[in-house]
């Protein structure tokens, strides 16, 4: 059994995502992890992902940077507490470019 709940609140970049599985599916875990990294890059936003380890963890408990880098991640299927000291940073060259292009497409409809 898989269960998925997804809520997007785009104006504040809040994403609630809940997914559990009765089978140990590392492929699904890797797929969701890749999607989270992609969302971080596309939205030029830090992504915080939290998932249950029971019965099987299908999404990472992790922090992804604005360019998709994994800043911190808990071990899959192991009880852990992730503590991350978030510091807001200025956009680098690539992040500025992605944000500018995204805003142009979104706000000007090009």
Image (spheres, rainbow, N blue to C red):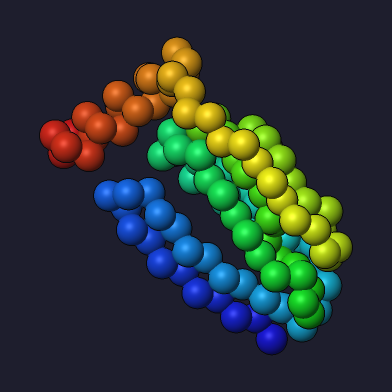
Rendering coords of residue 77 (x, y %): 83, 65
Q: Residue furthest left?
A: 108
| In the depicted structure, whether residue 58 falls above or below residue 41 | below
Identify the residue at horizontal 53%, vertical 45% (top origin). Answer: 47
Residue 38 vs residue 70, the one in the foreground: 70
Please provide percent x and percent y for residue 80: 80, 58
Asked where in the image residue 84 lies, by quadrant, the reply is top right
Q: Quadrant of residue 14?
A: bottom left
Q: Does 92 sit left or right of 13 as displayed?
A: right
Q: Is residue 63 above or below residue 10?
A: above
Q: Residue at x 56, y 36 (%)?
A: 86
Q: Residue 35 at x, y = what percent?
A: 57, 51
Residue at coordinates 74% horizontally, 46% vertically from top-left?
A: 73
Counting every numbered tag in the picture gives: 0
The answer to whether one can see residue 27 in this image is yes
Q: Which residue occupies the foreground of this view, 4 or 90?
A: 90
Q: In this view, does 37 lie to the left or right of 76?
A: left
Quadrant housing the N terminus? bottom right
Residue at 22% over, 29% down: 104
């Amino acid at each position: 059994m898989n269960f998925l709940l997804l809520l997007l609140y785009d104006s504040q970049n809040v994403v609630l995502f809940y997914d559990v599985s009765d089978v140990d599916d590392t492929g699904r875990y890797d797929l969701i992890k890749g999607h989270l990294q992609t969302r971080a890059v596309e939205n030029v936003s830090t992504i915080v992902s939290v998932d249950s380890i029971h019965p099987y963890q299908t999404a990472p408990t992790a922090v992804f940077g604005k360019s998709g880098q994994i800043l911190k991640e808990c071990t899959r299927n192991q009880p852990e507490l992730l503590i991350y000291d978030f510091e807001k940073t200025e956009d680098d060259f690539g992040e500025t470019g992605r944000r500018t292009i995204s805003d142009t497409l979104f706000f000007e409809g090009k």
